[in-house]
Image (spheres, rainbow, N blue to C red):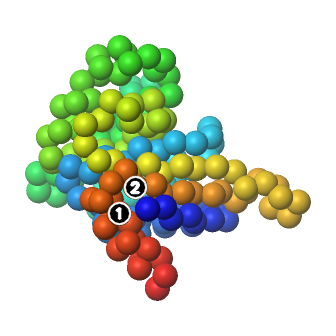
Amino acid sequence: MKIKVISDSPLFTSELGRTFSRIVSAGDIILLTGELGGGKTTFITGIAAGLGLERKISSPSFTILNEYRISGRREFVHVDLYRLENAGEIEEIGLDDYFYNNISIICVEWGDRIKKYLKKEFLEVDFGYVIDEKNEGNKRKIIFKSSGTYWDRKLEEFKRMLDK
């Protein structure tokens, strides 16, 4: 299943992430792909806010991974693979510990670099610029792509939320 949304501002992108957070569960993997500056971190900030994180979320470009405790046993893990170049580097980080522990909600920027290695369903959220004569590149096309029936069900619920 695919859902396409057009965002006309960073505020809308953040609020979209906040709404999306209502369908996210422990054990979920969200891979964010697309162009540099496309809105991936802004969307993740919205998810984090929707999950109740009050701390400012920033992209872990240099640390690669930031981990935040959420209520109960859940944790929110924000990964940025922009600086990594090969699968060997990715394996050294120990991401498998998070992917398969069933308590982490994981958002991975530049997630296209690892999707072929995942052994469970994930959601891909792709960010691209919409450039036309009027908006000068301020709009973003955000496409949610399911990798299987688990995410199909979640995206159907998300679509109902967006349609309201």
Residue 58: percent from left, percent from top = 45, 42
Question: The disc labelled 1 sits on which kind of residue?
Answer: Asp
SS of the residue under disc 2 = strand
Residue underneath mark 1 = 152
As drawn, the label of residue 146 is 2
Q: Residue furthest bottom?
A: 164
Q: How far separated are the C-alphas under marks 1 and 2?
A: 6 Å
SS of the residue under disc 1 = helix
Q: Are marks 1 and 2 in contact (CB under 8 Å)?
A: yes
Above/below status of 113 relative to 75: above
Examine the image and state in which quarter residue 68 appears.
Answer: top left
Looking at the image, which residue is at 58% across and 50% down? Answer: 127
Question: The disc labelled 2 sits on which kind of residue?
Answer: Ser
Looking at the image, which residue is at 15% across and 48% down? Answer: 103
Residue 128: percent from left, percent from top = 64, 49
Above/below status of 4 relative to 163: above
Q: Of 162 and 75, which appears nearest the observer?
A: 162
Horizontal arrangement in the rendering, residue 46 relative to residue 151 (left or right): right
Residue 141: percent from left, percent from top = 63, 58
**Nearest to N terminus: mark 1 or mark 2:** 2
Q: Of 134 and 52, which appears nearest the observer?
A: 134
> Local crowd at mark 1 within 10 Å, few (<14), some, or many (≥20)?
some
